[in-house]
């Protein structure tokens, strides 16, 4: 009996978590004008429409660009910061680590507002670049935290040995640190990519003419529900799933070695 | 390749703590030197200064006559064999051993040939394509040695390299280290806190304590003729008998000046040049190679002497025998020098 209850509980939990997504995906195939029950039969029409929609496809490209660019910059900056702070113990090390991680505790809305005002002051117009910078602000602390945690005594000793054998500092980082930290670097990159890909508030406030996909979807939603939004939502979800799977695989590799 | 090393009045402080006081030491080219001492004695600090990982607060370091005090590790003619091996886990043994050559801009073919040669020297030629995690501790240690020697350094620094190995393997590696050192002729500077290891490998032992060199000499000198009570104690077990001025001791008058008479357990026996008077056997234990005996001198029942006697001896607890000593060493009694 208890056994049955615990299975039922598990099923209920999964239903609670996954049902909205399942509904979204199912009604993206709806053969009708509204993505609401009853289900009238399957069609790929809406996928065809969104793939033919220029604004949506442009937004998709923009999102990919911003996500990969900001993830790359976040990982590089986070890696350099973590390497530096792991190498020497300065009097202010703890404080510097704290300051680096602090943005994680601030809500995206506040960060977006701050960036919007500051960009106004220095004359940066709302754009994809501005959004990218915003995403670096939120993802850099994450990358730093992941990479700093991955750097252990083992790593430090190997770096010391490389220096001892004549490696210059860039060679130590590139030939020893990066390969040794590869799983953590990949994890940091994929997480950053996913966060940037899904992020709405900063993108909404910091873009104007070229927008990212979440912003484009939001403007589509204003004209009412349509299986089209379900279809695009399913695609976004698919990309996120791919990223999460990639993340799992890289972390899994780390656990094995 | 090999070179002489000189420490010239080297001093090092960490904040208010002085890790090294005025160390002067010359190491001959091709010598196997062991820095020996308890943890915190400054031996690792001295090694780090030689490797360039620390810059001394004062003084100079010369390698082959050139001032290296402010030269970075990568530009020194030294390499280090680290305590935890510090192998690169993502590289094959061949690439690990060839890393230093790669940093010196040597082409792949040449460095692979050299790496093969070095791996052959340490008996791992057949495992060149393996990764470090596939090896045992002793094998990793050999790779670390091959990697450090591949660049033909003038001086090889060994930072407690055998500390993580079990006793049997450690003894075996000591012999290998010594043999390889003789073969390559590089100056070896080896740090350890194990005095047996020091005696097994060293040409000369440098005994250190509290940031100072206590004694520097061959294993025989350091063990048989210690310069201070500290090094006498640190090098092995020792019986200490106080000698007052005029040669008065608890065991009766002896032909020495004031100080502490130090006798190794194996220097006390039933025959010798220096009579210690009658003593009663209190306890004896069979140690295989020798019989470890505790004696109470009749003249000084408060004192206990440890002696290692030949294992064939037939003595019973409570027997009274006349004890004699060889190789007596008289050292000035100093305060705060007890190990």
Image: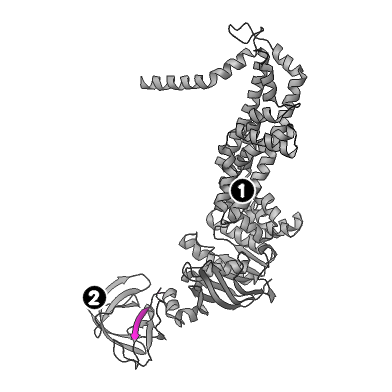
Which residue appears at 38% of the width and 82% of the height?
A: B262
Residue A82 disc label:
1
Where's the C terminus of chain B, which quadrant? bottom left
Subunit of mark 1?
A: A
- Asked if the stretch drawn in magenta spans residue B280, the answer is no
Instruction: From the viewer's side, name the closer residue of B242 and A210.
Output: A210
The quadrant where residue B229 appears: bottom left
Residue B324 disc label:
none
Q: Is residue A202 left or right of residue B317?
A: right
Q: Is residue B286 left or right of residue A76?
A: left
Residue B336 sits above or below residue A250 on the image: below
Residue A99 sits above or below residue B215 on the image: above
- Asked if the stretch drawn in magenta spans residue B238, the answer is yes
Residue B317 disc label:
2
Where's the N terminus of chain B, which quadrant? bottom right
User: Residue pushed farthest front?
Assistant: A121
């Amino acid at each position: 009996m208890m056994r049955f209850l615990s299975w039922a509980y598990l099923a209920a939990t999964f239903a609670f978590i996954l049902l909205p997504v399942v509904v979204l995906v199912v009604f993206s195939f709806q053969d009708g004008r509204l993505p609401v029950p009853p289900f009238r039969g399957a069609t790929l029409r809406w996928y065809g429409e969104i793939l033919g929609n220029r604004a949506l496809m442009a937004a998709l490209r923009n999102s990919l660009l911003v996500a990969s660019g900001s993830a790359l910059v976040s990982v590089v900056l986070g890696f350099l910061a973590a390497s530096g702070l792991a190498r020497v113990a300065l009097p202010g090390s703890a404080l510097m680590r704290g300051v680096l991680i602090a943005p994680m505790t601030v809500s995206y809305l506040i960060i977006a507002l701050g960036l919007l005002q500051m960009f106004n002051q220095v004359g940066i117009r709302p754009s994809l670049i501005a959004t990218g910078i915003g995403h670096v602000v939120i993802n850099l602390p994450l990358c730093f935290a992941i990479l700093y945690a991955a750097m252990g005594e083992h790593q430090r000793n190997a770096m010391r040995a490389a220096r001892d054998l004549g490696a210059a500092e860039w060679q130590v980082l590139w030939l020893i640190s990066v390969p040794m930290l590869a799983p953590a670097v990949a994890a940091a990159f994929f997480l950053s990519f996913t966060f940037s890909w899904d992020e709405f508030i900063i993108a909404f406030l910091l873009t104007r003419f070229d927008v990212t996909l979440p912003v484009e979807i939001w403007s589509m939603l204003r004209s009412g529900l349509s299986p089209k939004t379900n279809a695009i939502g399913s695609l976004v979800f698919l990309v996120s799933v791919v990223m999460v799977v990639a993340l799992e695989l890289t972390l899994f590799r780390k656990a094995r070695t | 390749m090999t070179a002489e090393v000189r420490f010239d009045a080297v001093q090092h402080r960490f904040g208010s703590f002085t890790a090294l006081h005025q160390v002067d030491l010359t190491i001959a080219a091709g010598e196997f030197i062991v820095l020996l001492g308890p943890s915190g004695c400054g031996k690792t600090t001295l090694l780090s200064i030689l490797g360039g990982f620390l810059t001394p607060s004062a003084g100079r370091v010369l390698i082959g006559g050139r001032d290296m005090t402010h030269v970075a590790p990568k530009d020194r003619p030294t390499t280090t064999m680290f305590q935890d091996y510090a192998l690169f886990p993502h590289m094959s043994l061949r690439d690990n051993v060839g890393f230093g050559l790669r940093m010196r801009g040597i082409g792949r073919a040449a460095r692979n040939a050299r790496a093969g040669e070095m791996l052959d020297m340490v008996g791992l030629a057949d495992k060149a394509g393996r990764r470090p995690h596939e090896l045992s501790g002793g094998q990793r240690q050999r790779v670390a040695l091959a990697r450090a020697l591949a660049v033909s350094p003038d001086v090889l620094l060994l930072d407690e390299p055998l500390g993580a190995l079990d006793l049997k393997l450690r003894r075996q590696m000591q012999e290998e280290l010594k043999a390889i050192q003789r073969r390559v002729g590089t100056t070896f500077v080896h740090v350890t806190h194990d005095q047996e290891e020091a005696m097994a490998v060293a040409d000369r032992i440098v005994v250190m304590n509290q940031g100072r060199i206590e004694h520097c000499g061959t294993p025989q000198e350091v063990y048989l003729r210690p310069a201070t009570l500290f090094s006498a104690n640190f090098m092995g077990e020792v019986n200490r008998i106080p000698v007052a001025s005029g040669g008065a001791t608890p065991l009766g008058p002896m032909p020495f000046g004031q100080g502490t008479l130090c006798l190794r357990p194996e220097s006390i026996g039933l025959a010798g040049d220096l009579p210690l008077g009658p003593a009663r056997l209190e306890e004896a234990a069979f140690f295989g190679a020798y019989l470890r005996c505790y004696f109470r001198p009749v003249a000084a029942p408060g004192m206990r002497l440890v002696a290692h006697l030949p294992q064939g001896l037939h003595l019973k607890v409570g027997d009274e025998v006349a004890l004699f000593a060889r190789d007596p060493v008289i050292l000035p009694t100093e305060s705060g020098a007890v190990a």
